[in-house]
Image (tube, rainbow, N blue to C red):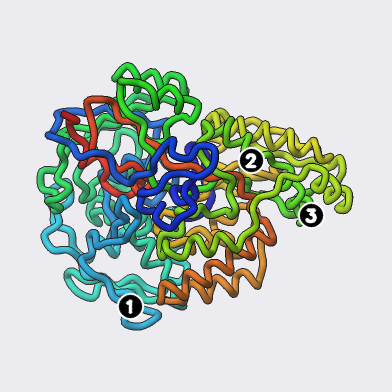
Amino acid sequence: MRTPRLLAALACTAALAVTASACSGASRPTGADAGSYTVTPLTPAAKRGLPLITWSLYAEPYTLDYAQAYDYPPNTVLANVCEQLLRVTPDLKVEPGLAVKWANPDPLVWVYTLRPGVTFHDGTVMTADDVVASLKRQMDPATGSPWGSAFKNVRAVEKTGPLEVTLRLTKPDVLLNELMAASPGTVESAAFLARTGKGYGVPGGKVNCTGPYALDTWQQGESITLRKHPGYWDEKLRPKTDTVRFTFVEDPAARTSAFLSGTADGGYMVPSSSFGQLRTTTKGKLYFGPNTATSNLAVLDFKGTLGDLKVRKALSMALDRPNIIKAAAGGIGVPAKAPTARGAWALLPERTEGYFKELDEPVHDVAGAKRLVEEAGATGKKITLVTSTLAPEISVVANAVQAAGRQIGLDVRLKAVAPEAYSSIFVDPNARKGLDLVITSGYDNTPDPLEFYQYLRTGDFGNYGSWSDPVYDSAFDRANAAADPGARSDLTQELQRIAMRELPIIPIYEAPYSVFLGSRVTGAPAGIAQLYYPWAATIGAAR
């Protein structure tokens, strides 16, 4: 989607192959692990349907409100329940969703023609009124949606026909249209929203969308159950499985045991510490899929020690990325050259290789880094890095950063917080007070890398450290006004150059998306597109 988020699984498909074809999943990695695994957007098709599958999440969703869904667990569930005006496919393309077509007749106008005959889970028919209410709710400050900034240039959302909605803008905004394939473009029943009010999307409550599955029950702390929607409109994605039950297992070892015992039929974002075990088991198969994410260090305070560019450069130079990859990603990944992964450049993948060749390879130079710290007068100065048990990778990376910092004369201190407090850092500015760095997984929801780079704009919700650069802001506006994909892609590369020169975010590494499927099931998309694509609909029996 966009801005850095929580680290749980990491990074990008194309980085593994250093070729444009990596985004299609056809390539293998290079380097020491070359040929040891492949990246594919799909797993083998299901043979028949099943009455029930059990799916493992690494954490319980904090909400099922589409306007608040800003992390992997809630989006993984909602991808099967709620739908957007547009749809991101497993191979990272944008296609029609609840809108059959869209048009940009004027740089300040986007028009969406809605799909006729779509029904919500309660049987009522979707109209333009539902779309208007759903989008306006994202924009309403009272909603407090982390997606609200996606509508920053929207002047009005209007019903211009029974099945037509028009967005009127204050300035050209190509990204707005692309984000209609992610949470900002979600459509919920207007009547249902009005009826449920503040009780919408909470444990024990209901959701009334248009997806292939309907929310049946949410037993807080135990499970979420979905049942197939018999009136679903998309024949090619009619559910093969009747019921999907989600369980929540935070402990990586316990989650791996659930996979091996068959207690869980599958799950995304597999613990990297279990890659070796799960790649050799006869109880199922571990797949690697397309990803748009990179493991990064996001600077949270530019008034402290890291406000000096020399210190940021020094910390980046001190990181031993290959060893971090071994410890944090099971050895599967590559050092990151930019805060966006190569897989995030799916807009024009044939240009990706050229863009990344322009960037310098990450350098591991402890002596040079120490000299930069001395030049900055920062020797002995404190940096507070937040860590958590939310995912084992977080602790591994945090310890590596602390060790690297101390090698070059920085006093890197780790502040451990509970998983929910770690999550709060990404949505609550008050939770960032007293912190200098946070480990994130920076990813796109759409195939356009400009989506990620919008979150470094001055004042953007995802600009966690409130970094500001007028040259960057101006370059972003030019890119976001470029309707031609080629021009927009080239302009986004300019943003990438600025980001790497100024380092408001320090890239660490890229790795593929992961999914484990037990031996009785197959059919799941393997990549990060599962956050919005109705992935459960294609899962069924393997034989």
Residue extending farthest bottom: 106
**Residue at 79% from the left image edge and 36% from the top image edge:** 406
Q: Circle 2 sits on which residue? A: 321
> x, y percentage for residue 503?
67, 56
- Foreground residue among 216 and 389: 389
**C-beta proximity under 8 Å, tags 3 and 2:** no
User: Is 30 left, or right, of 194 in this rendering?
Assistant: right
The CA span between labels 3 and 2 is: 19 Å
Q: Residues within 10 Å of mark 1 (few under 14, many from 20)?
A: some
The x and y percentages for residue 205 are 29, 37
The answer to the question of whether label 1 and label 3 lie on touching residues, with beta carbons closer than 8 A, is: no
Q: Are marks 1 and 2 in contact (CB under 8 Å)?
A: no
Whole-number angstrom distance, CA of label 1 to CA of label 2: 44 Å
- Classify mark 2: helix, strand or loop: helix
**Callout 2 crowding tier (Cα within 10 Å): few <14, some 14–19, many ≥20:** many
429 or 4, nearer to the observer:
4
Which residue, given by chain and number where applicable, does mark 3 sit on? 310
State the residue position of label 1: 104
Q: Amino acid at mark 2?
A: Arg
Mark 3: amino acid: Lys
Kind of element beneath mark 3: helix
Could you say where residue 135 lies in the image, as x and y percent from the top left?
A: 34, 61
